[in-house]
């Protein structure tokens, strides 16, 4: 651990890999494109997963589990879907020593297998809505992979709902987008932009795709969650119908929505710095690390006693680690826990003992201050709250500073090809302009933000009419 | 729901399927041998998983996640292992539209992929022990499948540890067996027999396999968890070595241990009865259901008020559901929640209102009793505790009643081929006797129980010397 990591300003991409590897969040596996999520990374995933799982349940959904395998024939039932996903599929052709009659695809997403079950379970309007979520592993055969950001196998949750009306489905779809946005901002301290994807970027098989987009520290966008209004496309492909109160048979209206282990990549790149990770307290597996600075024997005994008491007092509320390992120096430990992004470090040595104080060092801004023993417990809580808020504020300010509103294509290109950032520019709505801009500048339309007001403007490329600025950016 | 289910005494196997399907724990999927775990079943799995996960962490382990895919060449490195598992493997031959250079096996267990990483991570004695667990899906191409008990895909946890000495590894292995036994008895209310597997039944690649075995209501045994002392077999195959304090290079000593969604099958068959599931309170996703019995309008308002207050008062400690759906009758509800195995039902109607009482009905023994309003909260807790204990006691008594100690092979066969049960009999230790007994009677050696004392005896089949009775039974 604690190897040298590249500077963000020198090589952001190398910085990212260095941080992931040296903080032991993940490692490359011997299987092409697959990663190993190591205990440090998995502990973060557990915090993200458990927090979001609670929010998904509180919004009325239940968890279930569907098969990893999807028969090839199922996959082909929705035309757009198969076109979008089959180039990415891993295929099982043999099982139990024999060639299979029909190849099985490993789920790249589970619409088809899940809706084949819904068609069995749903008979009547009384069975609706169906509100189910699953946490699962997913396989997409990616050509270029990056730890957490794009891997052949990843972990995610996928919600799949069925409703009696389109209005209800659309409401669900936007409600879950709000849940994702709240989750990102409140817990991950990542401000997001909610909006609708362009036709070109929508999910294969959806009527509409909504997403949340966040800015990384290299000013690129990262799609951090999507919610799809599937219309009746899959319902028709899988014959998911219900009898209305009046006795008619109607197709259901469906949604699906998901976030993945990619969020760990977002967390790293939204907050990390040249010293390593910066983990917001609400997501940090360890919120506070206490490091004793050794002195004489009597002093050490008193220091240990203070630490033991503090630990007992607070460890049910705050996740706290004491590192009194004598094989490593305090300085080494400081670097190590900064690399790991632990929000708050508390030091206590002989001098602090004399003053009945401890030293607080914050990871978000590096500030040091003393706290009296009697105040420590309350102060830990208030400082953690403050760190959480400050990390969000820093990310918000950073995004604001790096968001531009160019109306001229040369200016647009200068920004994209120079410092980068979010570009809110007008777009005529045509695929051809979207594609040409991407080809020429590598900036894509990340989303059509809800927050952008209607206004008359001209497409940044062709000058055609536009009613709204959309979000362009280089993107992960 | 609430379709007719077969009687246990008429057809235990049909009873099992009927209960699983009608309580909506699981369903057959369109993919050969794979099941869908429905929300009712998954909620039980979440309780089992979260409880055991806490115990695994408290015993010093951390979670991680390793790839689903295992290169075929890895798989072949440990000779016994590949022999045991390759006939059960699903094989990916194509990815991203192309034929793969090397086929990938879908993990039937993860020793090989995990230990290839351990060989990268472990350098020195300072890196030991490595204590890692993962929750994952597993694929084994089973010929005959049963929901939860034996499915092509299932969910499980697998612990994988590496140690400096054999003693330490063996200690870990037995410690985790104790964790499983405590988990089964304390939470699932299933008494288990701990012991060692015979050579024939041990894990492919292990030095020794330990297991916990429990008795189902048809008197068959179900292996409910295994813990393997892997010796240095995999360490040698994957070159997992460490430098000792003295500077020598040594192979590590390893263990692996796991339990799976099979435990849900154990829960159903250990406690269920002709009315459906019986779920122990500590594992029940819903512990108490309150059913109002409607009367006049004023009475209903008072009943609702009482229920709202009780709910507010207790729902943070006890998982409680109120069913005031007017489309179904109280009688229908009683049957339904008995089918679902909810430990405690509380009824309150106009008569109870007058007496300021409610009626408690226990799922474990069907007993009804009244409780005064002021006592309800405390009584719920004490009755749930009592139900938990009673379910374990019933299972213990049942096992005791159906455990036999035959010393004569004719007697042995009479029992196995008649009423069934656990047979503690002497065995000479030879494969040939073990196989012949299985062939003739279908009873297998489930385990060599720790609890059986050393004594001189004669093998139940061949009369050869034996020092210990072993556990024979028909087994799942």
Image (cartoon, coloured by chain):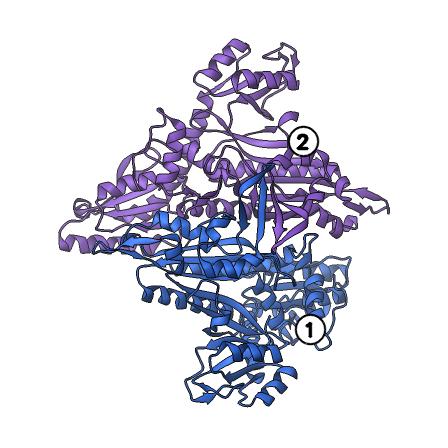
Chain colours: A blue, B purple
Estimate the spatial distance between the alpha carbons at disc 2 and disc 1, rounded to whole Å.
49 Å
**Helix, strand or loop under label 2:** strand
Location of the N terminus of chain B by quadrant is top left
Q: Mark 1 lies on which chain?
A: A
Q: Report which quarter residue A164 is drawn in.
A: bottom left
Q: Which residue is drawn at 33% across and 38% down?
A: B339
Which of the pair A439/B416 is nearer the observer? A439
Q: Position of residue B161 (x, y in %)?
A: 68, 44
Locate residue B66 relative to residue B358 in the image: left or right. Answer: right
Crowd rating for badge 2 (residues with CA inside 10 Å; few <14, some 14–19, many 20+): many
Q: Where is residue B157 in the image (x, y as percent from the top left)?
A: 57, 44
Tag 2–tag 1 contact (CB < 8 Å)? no
Locate residue A236 relative to residue A319 in the image: left or right. Answer: left
Which of the pair B362/B230 is nearer the observer? B230
Same subunit: marks 2 and 1: no
- Residue mark closest to the camera, 2 vs 1: 1
Image height of B414 relative to A319, above or below: above
Q: Residue B208 carries which label?
A: 2
Q: Position of residue A169 (x, y in %)?
A: 36, 64
- Residue B436 seen in render: yes
Q: Position of residue A133 (x, y in %)?
A: 44, 55
Image height of A380 relative to A367, above or below: above
Q: Residue at x 43, y 18 (%)?
A: B419
Q: Residue B133 carries which label?
A: none
Which of the pair A367/B103 is nearer the observer? B103
- Residue B341 seen in render: no
Crowd rating for badge 1 (residues with CA inside 10 Å; few <14, some 14–19, many 20+): some
Which of the pair B288/A99 is nearer the observer? A99
Q: Which chain carries label 2?
A: B
The residue identified by callout 1 is A12
């Amino acid at each position: 651990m604690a190897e040298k990591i590249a500077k963000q300003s020198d090589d952001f991409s190398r910085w990212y890999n260095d941080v992931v590897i040296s903080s032991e969040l993940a490692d490359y596996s011997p299987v092409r494109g697959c990663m190993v999520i190591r205990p440090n990374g998995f502990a973060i995933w557990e915090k993200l997963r458990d927090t979001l799982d609670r929010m998904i349940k509180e919004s009325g959904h239940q968890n279930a589990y569907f098969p990893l395998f999807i028969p090839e024939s199922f996959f082909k039932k929705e035309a757009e879907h198969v076109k979008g996903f089959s180039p990415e599929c891993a295929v099982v052709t043999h099982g139990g020593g024999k060639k299979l009659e029909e190849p099985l695809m490993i789920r790249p997403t589970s619409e088809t297998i899940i809706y084949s079950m819904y068609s069995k379970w749903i008979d009547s309007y009384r069975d609706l809505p169906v509100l189910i979520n699953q946490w699962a592993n997913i396989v997409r055969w990616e050509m270029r992979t990056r730890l957490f950001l794009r891997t052949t196998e990843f972990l995610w949750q996928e919600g799949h709902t069925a409703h009696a009306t389109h209005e209800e489905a659309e409401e669900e779809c936007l409600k879950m987008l709000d849940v994702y946005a709240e989750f990102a901002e409140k817990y991950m301290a990542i401000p997001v932009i909610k909006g609708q994807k362009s036709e070109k970027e929508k999910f294969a098989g959806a009527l509409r795709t909504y997403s949340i987009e966040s800015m990384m520290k290299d000013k690129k966008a990262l799609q951090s969650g999507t919610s799809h209004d599937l219309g009746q496309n899959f319902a028709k492909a899988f014959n998911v119908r219900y009898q209305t109160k009046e006795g008619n048979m109607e197709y259901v209206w469906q949604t699906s929505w998901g976030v993945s282990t990619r969020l760990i990549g977002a967390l790293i790149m939204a907050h990390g710095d040249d010293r390593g990770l910066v983990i917001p307290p609400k997501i940090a597996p360890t919120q506070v690390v206490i490091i004793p600075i050794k002195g004489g024997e009597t002093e050490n005994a008193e220091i240990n006693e203070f630490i033991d008491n503090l630990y007992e007092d607070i460890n049910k509320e705050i996740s706290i680690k004491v590192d009194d390992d004598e094989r490593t120096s305090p300085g080494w430990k400081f670097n190590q826990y900064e690399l790991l992004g632990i929000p708050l470090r508390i030091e206590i040595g002989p001098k602090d003992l004399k003053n009945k104080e401890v030293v607080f060092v914050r990871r978000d801004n590096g500030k040091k201050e003393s706290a009296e023993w009697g105040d420590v417990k309350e102060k830990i809580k208030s400082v953690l709250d403050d760190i959480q808020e400050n990390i969000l504020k820093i990310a918000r300010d950073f995004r604001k500073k790096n968001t531009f509103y160019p109306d001229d294509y040369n200016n647009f290109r200068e920004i994209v090809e120079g410092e980068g950032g979010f570009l809110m520019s007008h777009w005529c709505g045509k695929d051809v302009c979207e594609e040409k801009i991407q080809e020429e500048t590598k900036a894509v339309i990340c989303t059509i933000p809800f927050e952008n007001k209607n206004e008359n403007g001209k497409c940044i490329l062709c000058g055609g009419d536009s009613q709204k600025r959309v979000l362009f950016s280089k993107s992960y």
